[in-house]
Image (tube, helix red, strand yellow):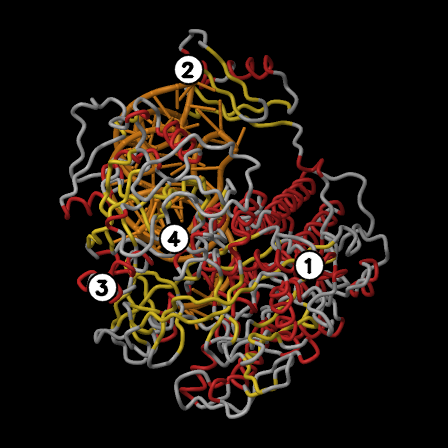
Amino acid sequence: MTTNSQKNERYNAREAEPRWQKVWDERGIFATKNDPPSRQGAAADRPAPTSRSPQGEAGKYYVLEMFPYPSGRIHMGHVRNYTMGDVVARYKRAMGFSVLHPMGWDAFGMPAENAAMDRKVHPKAWTYENIATMKGQLKSMGLSLDWAREIATCDPAYYKHQQKMFLDFLKAGLVERKQSKVNWDPVDQTVLANEQVIDGRGWRSGAVVEQRELTQWFFKISDYSQDLLAALDTLDRWPEKVRLMQKNWIGRSEGLLIRFMLDRATMPNMENELEIFTTRPDTLFGAKFMGLSPDHPLAAAAAAKNPKLAAFIEECHRMGTAQAEIDTAEKMGFDTGIRAVHPFDPNWKLPVYVANFILMDYGTGAIFGCPAHDQRDLDFVNKYGLGNTPVVCPPGQDPKTFVITDVAYDGDGTMINSRFLDGMTIAEAKEEVARRLENTFAAASTGAATSPPPPLRGRDREGGIANSGLEVTPLPNPPPQGGREKTMRGERITQSNNAPVAQRQVNYRLRDWGISRQRYWGCPIPIIHCAKCGVVPVPEKDLPVTLPDDVTFDRPGNPLDRHPTWKHVKCPQCGGDARRETDTMDTFVDSSWYFARFTDPWIANAPTDRKQVDRWLPVDQYIGGIEHAILHLLYSRFFTRAMKKTGHAGLDEPFAGLFTQGMVVHETYRKKNGDWAMPAEVKIETSGDTRRATLIATGEEVEIGPIEKMSKSKKNTVDPDDIMESYGADTARWFMLSDSPPERDVIWSEEGVQGASRFVQRLWRLVGEIADIKAPAARPAQFGDAALAVRKAAHRALANVSDDIARLRFNRCVAHIYECANALGEAIGTVESAVTPDLAWALREAGDILVCLFHPMMPHLAEECWAALGHKTLVATEAWPQLEPELLVESTVTLPVQINGKKRADVTVARDAGKTDIEAAVLALDAVKRALGGKSPKKVIVVPQRIVNVVA
RNA sequence: GCGGACGUGGCGGAAAGGUAGACGCAAGGGACUUAAAAUCCCUUGGGAGAAAUCCCGUGAGGGUUCGAAUCCCUCCGUCCGCACCA
């Protein structure tokens, strides 16, 4: 391909790209073997071992992009995501790392079933067709992926192991079956995720969603709440934003669990106490009422004797779960007639209300209301006339005159109106209340608290229920209705069954992960239900439990459930008639461990080969969208811990480095009739500052709308295939990395693509010109100024690009490559006819460096250029160029000179000039003399290598 | 409501507290061409000036500093996450 006429030929990406893809493929250079690194596949066609950093020598590097859902075709978001990963993979390979860069398919999920319903295709057929299409598209992008490790999560060879781990987790106590409230779509007869409920209706059916109690399988992620939270601090290569989002999601709060005795005369049944959780025990003397969730057992007990209360609770249940309704819902309550006794004052009785704003599944489902310092409580008392007493006085306010009317005060301050707490800070008061109450033991239901307490530590844990010996009826444990069990989600700091009035408790917002889905296209849960033996795990020898192929989608509901034979099996324990679990797993389970499977996707008898998992994990660089900041990434962190506990992995954190890339956005175009037009249908004309868009077909003018995320609904999508067809993959890849910082959104524009395409051609011409230069084989002993300038430009670019790739600042890499190309172009432009040998050598060296630098971004063009420069190797297996740091060091340095902080001149001094020399040189400058007007400066600040500032 | 991020030319964006606007796009002018495309050269934050040069400029207003796009305070705006979480 080395020709002298290259400068007249355009680079033909359409011809070159498949050709190089074939070469890479045939030589298998991106296949990563699980052998010792010195036997890496790529070693074969590498030049002699003189190579500067043979592959694999630097250790392992696992780069992974979030694998795609096979929805049909790749979109520009994929192009951006996978280009970034590929740049890292190719760079690390060149740096001598043994790189693992695999790809697979997140292949289970609802769209396949929807397609089955809409178009009568089998989900499996639909999925595998999509995989074939998308794989072809990814291959045409020239990604350096190890396709030998390809996995699809819908393959029984994959989900078999997932079922095995489910059973292992079950044995390890990490799986639980329990009742839970779910969003139920009565038309589609399935559970909907919260995101699938839009304005209280199913997103697909439009039916009003019901709340149903279903028995479901849960992964006990909440066992790891504290660990998942604490370990966030160790993830120093994660975006701060993602860590914060996870922290908020886990939602740790420290507080006090307080038992309020109930006034016996008002108790509906035999209950004698009400347990509440609070983070503000300091405000206990501001209490005005107690609040119960409508789902609270005590509310139910009271409702049994009060039809009006029962009706109120019923109304609360009818209230939608839709966000909009919750936002606007008025605080409503109903007095149960029950009275609770203040823990510090037996004569102080508080009314117990059922209130619509109290959640059953946080804390204990009950609160005490302190209206002065909580807006919700204030709204509530203002409606029911319960009044408020401020107990925290803001700094600078007079406690005598400080009142609360409509706005609760939740800031800092000094305790007031609070008896023994008065004068304390909030923190002191919290501590004092906790200290007193955890050393107080509950008395009779009439209210008196007794003391003194026995010593806290070392007490008998079998001590029984609270206030034994007094006239109380112990609360059954566990309680009859689901509520109380949920209070146990928190971790009690003080363990005691001897029941002090209060215990310190840490609560988490994080709920256990419900994984049951009433769907066909998912991983079957390997469980058998037997009337005699109960819940029986499928024996390991019977795995995988595979999905039946003969299913129908003509009716709503779960096809597995109505399959004539699939669910009917014999109980593995007693041999009697039994039935399979027909729920399948949430597809987030599939994606919670695929990164571990990639380390050895071939092993048939276990999910992972510990040797390989230990060698490759953690993923060194994970790249994907911010939309997975919480669920996928949190589930994977949990799953990795669970795999460690069950012996399938050896670490806690799967992703050492995480990068979240921005979206691809595009202008929108709207026709006169309100319909959207696709970018491909529109022609843009620019004259001066105005742009107008017309339909190519009809000439109709269309309105140019705001720039938005590419979406089918707004039709502002650009098909990657079209771009690769007309410009080539390299142009698309280059544009994706240009301009916008990778974590921000990138605006796809026709002009931008054309700019990228022009640069592809420019590089091709530039390399052609360099290839035409005859250079000496041996490195010259001396370099003239022109040659030195070229070498400096190339090595500066090398240093900058290396640094910026390592930090994933691809837009800056692009800029540095432009600079380098500009510098080389200029240098060549000045020589044309007579090139001295040193300059010729320098230009050839710079050409080689330049090609290596853009290879990770534009690999096909780089191969073509590499060959044109006369190399017989592949640039894809070439080592990263060796930097000569002395070329970055100038013998003189030009410092900007400021006068009173404003730049007024430059001064050029020797690089190692001392401060006094620099000062003298600066004061000799005309501009400085002029500014000083003969006076001497007040001060001269010299920052070595940086700047000089003269204070006049 | 709570938490967070961001705000720089016509546009995307560069700037370890140290020359604001790198690099690209767009625009304008010119060269080549019969012409177009492609390519190459020049100009391009605002203002004053023939020029040297000077003044103003990083959402607004204060502050710290020899020096602030960058740090601190107040405000405005945009975006994101969570949300009757007690």
Location of mark 1 (residue): A649
Residue A558 location (% of width, % of height): 45, 83
**Which of label 2 and label 1 is nearer to you?**
1
- Name the secondary structure under disc 4: loop
Q: Which amino acid type corresponds to the residue marked 2 in the rendered image?
A: Arg
Using a 10 Å C-alpha cutoff, classify the residue at mark 4 as few (fewer than 14 neighbours), some (14 to 19) or many (20 or more). Answer: many
Task: Out of A322 and A356, give the one closest to the viewer.
Answer: A356
**Where in the figure is residue B39, as x and y percent of width and height?**
52, 59
Q: Earlier in the sequence, mark 3 or mark 1?
A: 3
Side of A14 where B4 appears, left or right: left
Q: Which is closer to the viewer, label 4 or label 2?
A: 4
Asked if residue A600 is positioned above or below residue A273 in the image, the reply reads: below
- Badge 1 local density, few (<14 within 10 Å), some, or many (20+)? many
Marked residue chain, label 3: A
Neighbour tally class for label 2: few under 14, some 14-19, many 20 plus, Cα within 10 Å: few
Labelled disc at residue A310: 3
Ranked by sequence position, the earlier of labels 4 and 2 is 4
Which mark is first along the chain, 1 or 2? 1
Q: How many marks?
A: 4
In the rendered image of this protein, does residue A801 appear above or below residue A918?
A: below
Ranked by sequence position, the earlier of labels 4 and 3 is 3
Quadrant holding the C terminus of chain A: top left
Which quarter of the figure has residue A88? bottom right
Judge by depth and name the residue closer to the eye, A35 or A885: A35
Closer to the eye: label 3 or 1: 3
Sequence order check, earlier mark of 3 and 2: 3
- Residue A930 numbered tag: 2
Please indicate, yes or no, whether residue A342 appears anywhere in the rendered image: yes
Disc 2 to disc 1, how far (Cα)? 72 Å
